[in-house]
Amino acid sequence: MERSVIVTPEAYQIMLTHAFTHEREEIGGVLVGYNEAHETSVITVIPLQRTSQLSDRVNISEVELAGCIDKCEEISKDMKSPVSVVGWYHSHPHITPFPSHVDLQTQLNFQSMDQNFIGLIFSTFIHQADSPMQMVALVGFQSTSTQKEKRLNVRIQSLPNSQLSFYHVSCRQWKSISDCIKDELIHRADNSLPDHEASTSKCSNFQCE
């Protein structure tokens, strides 16, 4: 039986807001929630700072990824319920939401550590030639051993998380988007200094197109 994915409206809003912060560059983060037999529930997300700002890929440092463990522990404490990183997300501005070969390889690497790990891709800023409408698309996927896409059924659905702590966590994660942008601007400014080149980190454990 194929996995299905439930995304809370709050998590969806955070990801969509993050994706709309950059029209010409991809963004990324991790999905936080829990797994059941054939279903993954995403209750919130952690937007992550990128090490580079590119139109066709997003690179996240190992330090950022490692920090997600502490953030999940903090969220678990606030929610009074255990949660963990269950997947990752990134954006495809101006292109289709379907995973590239790099996306599929990255996904396969994650699945080698957790077979239930999932990926979500947001396609944003899509204009239809014969319509004034602008489209947003969301695709959930996993990767097969031959790096073929395995599409997942994704539903936006409210979960029984009406306690105040859930909304506190959601608001905090939504506000963290601005922190990511600020830190990226500082990182970019620091790297523009000639004497800073030697200390620039080039980690790319999380890479996608």
Image (cartoon, helix red, strand yellow):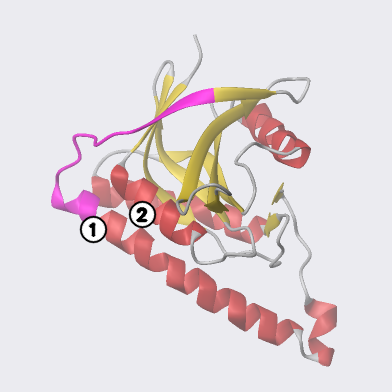
Looking at the picture, tell me which residue is in the foreground, 56 or 107.
56
Residue numbers of the magenta segment: 152-168
Q: Is residue 47 magenta?
A: no
- Which residue is outermost to the left? 163
Q: Is residue 165 left or right of residue 92?
A: left
Q: Secondary structure at mark 2?
A: helix
Circle 1: is it few (<14), some (14-19), or many (20+) Cα within 10 Å? some
Q: Is residue 199 left or right of residue 34?
A: right
According to the image, label 2 marks what residue?
74
According to the image, label 1 marks what residue?
168
Residue 14 quadrant? bottom left
Amino acid at the residue labelled 2 = Glu
Q: Is residue 159 magenta?
A: yes
Residue at left offset 76%, top offset 26%: 147
Residue 71 shows up from this direction:
no
Q: Above or below — where is 176 with respect to 134?
A: below
Q: Position of residue 205 (x, y in %)?
A: 72, 50
Q: Position of residue 130 (x, y in %)?
A: 54, 47
Residue 48 quadrant? bottom right
Residue at left offset 23%, top offset 58%: 168
